[in-house]
Image: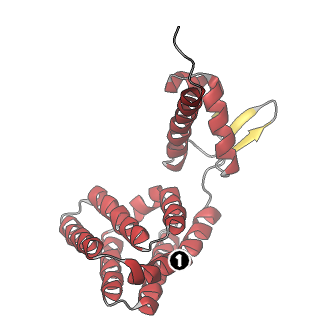
Amino acid sequence: MEEFDLRKEVTDRYSLRGRVYNKIREDILAGSYQENEELRENTLAQELGVSRTPVREALRQLELEGLVTIIPNKGAAVTGITSKDIHDIYMIRSYLEGLCARWACEHITAAQIEALEETLYLSDFHARRSNFEQLVELDNKFHDLIYKASGSKILDHVLSDFHHYVERIRKITLSRPARAKNSSKEHAAILEAIKARDGELAEKLANEHIINTMKNIIEQGL
């Protein structure tokens, strides 16, 4: 008789819940669901090929994040990301990204600087060819590299999460040639400040970069 491994059973259960949670979360953030749209446990379980239990657990976790509202005896509905949420995220990001850039001045390695320079080069290349999907990926990479360079796993985790929350909006803004060009210039200035180990300037430029993005979102009526 096969020996029962409790640790493996618990790991598998939570791994499954994690996959279900991530899939539903990504779909909500990508705009696959309308605001207030009902999320039926049975339907989601069938679509994902799982039982209702991991779906129910995932929805409870999403409720804690404010992405879903669970109404007793009725079910779950999508809350999603509101315009105010987006504004709040960008305001918080502006401060945290500034701090991240300042700390990167103290901890960044030569290899990380080289990776950032390569990212900027590729961004310019794809911007000239209007390859906006690649630009979004490179924008993600640029910020992620600085998060890592800060030397703070807490900042890395928080900022990566915020970045993912507004990914749909970022895809729209970076598809505007003018904003894509300005964003690339702002990235280059931030990197030069970091290379010069000028923490004050790096913080200021990173803060302004996020504020400029938010202004662009407001101007576009997004």
Helix, strand or loop at mark 1? helix
Residue occupying the point 39% across, 83% down: 105
Q: Is residue 13 visible?
A: yes
On the image, which quarter does residue 121 sit in?
A: bottom left
Is 32 displayed left or right of 70 in the figure? left
* Residue lying furthest right: 72
- Residue 123, image x and y in percent? 24, 68
Is 200 displayed left or right of 85 in the figure? left
Residue occupying the point 66% across, 35% down: 57
Q: Badge 1: few (under 14), some or many (20 or more) residues near its Cα, within 10 Å?
A: many
Which residue occupies the foreground of this view, 28 or 111?
111
On the image, which quarter does residue 107 sit in?
A: bottom left
Q: Is residue 206 above or below residue 22?
A: below
Q: Which residue is mark 1?
A: 94
How many discs appear?
1
Residue occupying the point 52% across, 50% down: 29
Residue occupying the point 39% across, 92% down: 198
